[in-house]
Amino acid sequence: GILPARDLLISAAERAALARAIEGASRLVGATAPNPPVGCVLLDADGAVLAEGYHLKAGAPHAEAAAIAEARMRNVEDLIHTVVVTLEPCNHHGRTPPCAEAILKTPARRVVIAAADPNPSVRGGGAALLAEAGLDIVWPEQSRNAADTRLALSARRLIAPFSKLVLTGRPWVTLKQAVDEGGRMIPPPGQKTFTSEASLRLAHQFRRRADAILTGSGTVLADDPAFTVRLVADFPGKKRFLVLLDRRKRVPERYVEEATQRGFDVFRAVNLDDALDRLGAEGVLEVLVEAGPAITRAMFGAGLVDEHVLITKGEPDRVRISHAIPEFDALNGAGEQPGERQ
Ligand code: AOF
Ligand code: ZN
């Protein structure tokens, strides 16, 4: 669990470091599945930045390890005083050694942790290990400063898909829907219906971060959608799943072959539960639903949507993003969308 706060006074330098770590990690949303995006900034006793590190992908060093390695390379490891990290340092041996132990090998005295690790094999353990070793553990979530609690909320949003996956075995579901000004879904709902360049770009930003796309046979037959990431940079070599709700096998084999050539791992699912269970088992953090009215209605009806991106066509188009966890709606706006650059 969450430890009692020992020193809730977060310095301006620590706050800025946390904002930087969150910003850097948010650019990696979509790159790390099944792991969460994580950022870490190391400060000296005066609050100056010594090094930063990010978890680039599963199997690569964790953010803390990457930051410590950079500090070592720069010959400033001895100056490390504060570790600012977006996610609680791990204390388990996974694909990489435990970050809590790596931190204990440095002279760090203080660790600012923006979000607890929801992973049952870590939860609270990393922070406890560091606290037992005598380090001060600071949780911005418990701060009375609104800027700190907002950063903590951003950090929780950053790992929300990971939290959902480790706690439920299912990926975070983002459903994209375009409607006309009367609120009618425009059939077919594929990318070709967007008139505005800005909306199309937004759609591709959501594809970029998705580890899977879910669609129905109707959308495929009507639109022949490619589902590739264009207009924004993709993560090089990233593999995605393409799930077809196609019980009657209406999607031609040729389409499946072409999608495979575009880099998709294609499978047909019998229903939504089956689709989400299988994606979760594959370690998919985020699935983007780009489908027609029937699947959209079914997903809402079954309470399966975590994030709803509603694009209302007009001059200009309007975009509304809402979450099943309403707290996250407060983050909508400039800061929330992962940047398209890497
Ligand atoms: C951290 N820093 O940057 C990340 C963490 O298989 P592994 O060794 O990569 O461990 C993955 C688990 O580690 C993951 O499920 C999550 O609990 C934690 N992720 N922890 O301290 C990081 N990516
Ligand atoms: Zn770690």
Image (tube, helix red, strand yellow):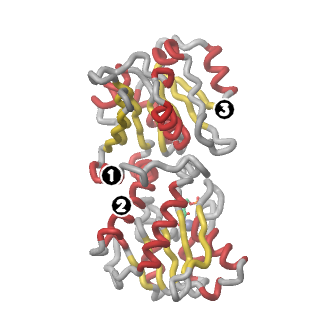
Name which quarter of the figure residue 303 lies in.
Answer: top left
What amino acid type is highlighted by mark number 3? Answer: Gly
Q: Does label 2 or label 1 sit earlier along the sequence?
A: 2
Q: Secondary structure at mark 2?
A: helix
Q: Is residue 105 visible?
A: yes
Q: Is residue 283 above or below residue 310?
A: below
> Which of the two residues, 201 or 130, is positioned nearer the viewer here?
201
What amino acid type is highlighted by mark number 1? Answer: Phe
Rendered residue at 59%/60% (across/down): 55
Question: Foreground mark, 3 or 1?
Answer: 1
Rendered residue at 61%/52% (across/down): 342
Residue 328's tag is 1
Residue under numbered circle 3: 263
Crowding around mark 3 (Cα neighbors within 10 Å: few <14, some 14 to 19, many 20+) is some
Instruction: Kindly indicate whether the residue at mark 1 contacts the one at mark 2 (C-beta within 8 angstroms).
Output: yes
Q: Is residue 81 above or below residue 60?
A: below
Residue under numbered circle 2: 153
Q: Secondary structure at mark 3?
A: loop
Looking at the image, residue 327 sits to the left or right of residue 338; the answer is: left
Q: Does label 3 or label 1 sit earlier along the sequence?
A: 3
Question: Foreground mark, 2 or 3?
Answer: 2
Q: Secondary structure at mark 1?
A: helix
What amino acid type is highlighted by mark number 2? Answer: Leu
* Marks 2 and 3, how far apart at CA: 34 Å
Looking at the image, residue 170 sits to the left or right of residue 90; the answer is: left
- The image position of residue 162, as x and y in percent, is 46, 52
Report if the beta carbon of the residue with label 1 is closer than 8 angstroms to ligand 1: no
- The image position of residue 330, as x and y in percent, is 30, 53
Judged from this view, the residue extending furthest toward the front is 315
